[in-house]
Image: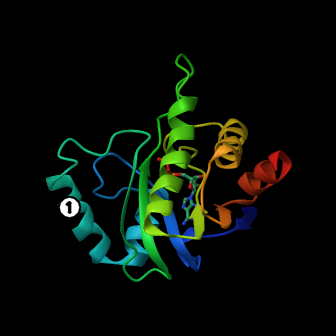
Amino acid sequence: MEITLVPGDITEQQVDAVVNAANSSLMGGGGVDGAIHRRGGPEILEECRKLRASPFGKGLPTGQAVATTAGRLPARWVIHTVGPVYSRSEDRSGLLASCYRESLRVADELGARSVAFPAISTGAYGWPMDDAARIALEAVRQAHTQVEDLRFVLFDAAAYAVFEARL
Ligand code: ADP
């Protein structure tokens, strides 16, 4: 597996699967979630609604992942995963690592060979970028997966620099 860093917007990535830093409602939100639904169109939300009816009536649990169509995005699937909200009093790094592991497990189920990840939990969920980058890189390096092309798509220059230093 080759790991690359890409500056910019994940909704422009031509890959088999794009990972969304969703929230457990699966009903859309801000940040990368908002961008994916905006660019991908209503088809994605429609599938998310069905998943909320069943099997995720109570929402997608933190650390888990599920796939939908990518709608109009230049990808085949969106893999939605729910990152943990950062906490200074509780170590939730296992849940953050689980997002990467579970997303890759779903990617393997789909037969995806190229996958683009955002820096999960580092926006609204407040995870410090350097720690999030360490956890993300460790998790994907340890994963047993068929994915050959794994990209971290970093929205701002500071995030890119942090990932570059870690890689
Ligand atoms: P979370 O709720 O998991 O923190 P956010 O979407 O708020 O998710 O932020 C996760 C990361 O995604 C942040 O570093 C943010 O800067 C970045 N981000 C926001 N929009 C995009 C985008 N279009 N492409 C790639 N990354 C993005």
At x 70% / y 41%, what residue is drawn?
A: 138
Which residue is depicted at the point 61% across and 64% down? 147
Asked whether residue 37 is in view, the answer is: yes
User: In front: 108, or 90?
Assistant: 108
* Disc 1: CA contacts within 10 A as few (<14), some (14-19) or many (>=20): some
Is residue 21 toward the left or the right of residue 56 in the image? Answer: right
Residue 4 falls in image quadrant: bottom right
Quarter assignment of residue 152: bottom right
> Is residue 126 visible to us here?
no
Q: Is residue 97 above or below residue 46?
A: above
Q: Amino acid at mark 1?
A: Arg
Q: Is residue 87 left or right of residue 45?
A: right
Task: Name the residue tied to disc 1.
Answer: 49
The residue depicted at 36 percent of the width and 79 percent of the height is: 71
| Horizontal arrangement in the rendering, residue 27 relative to residue 31 (left or right) | left
Observer-nearest residue: 160 or 139? 139
Q: Position of residue 122 (x, y in %)?
A: 58, 45
User: Helix or strand or loop: what does disc 1 sit on?
Assistant: helix
Image quarter of the N terminus:
bottom right
In the image, residue 89 lies at what x, y percent? Answer: 54, 16
Q: Is residue 116 above or below residue 53?
A: below
Residue at (53, 44) in percent of width and height: 121
* Residue reaching furthest to the left: 53
Q: Residue 117 placed where, x, y %?
A: 58, 59
Q: Viewed as shown, does residue 128 lie left or right of 77? A: right
**Position in image of residue 50 (x %, y %):** 18, 62
Q: Quadrant of ligand 1?
A: bottom right
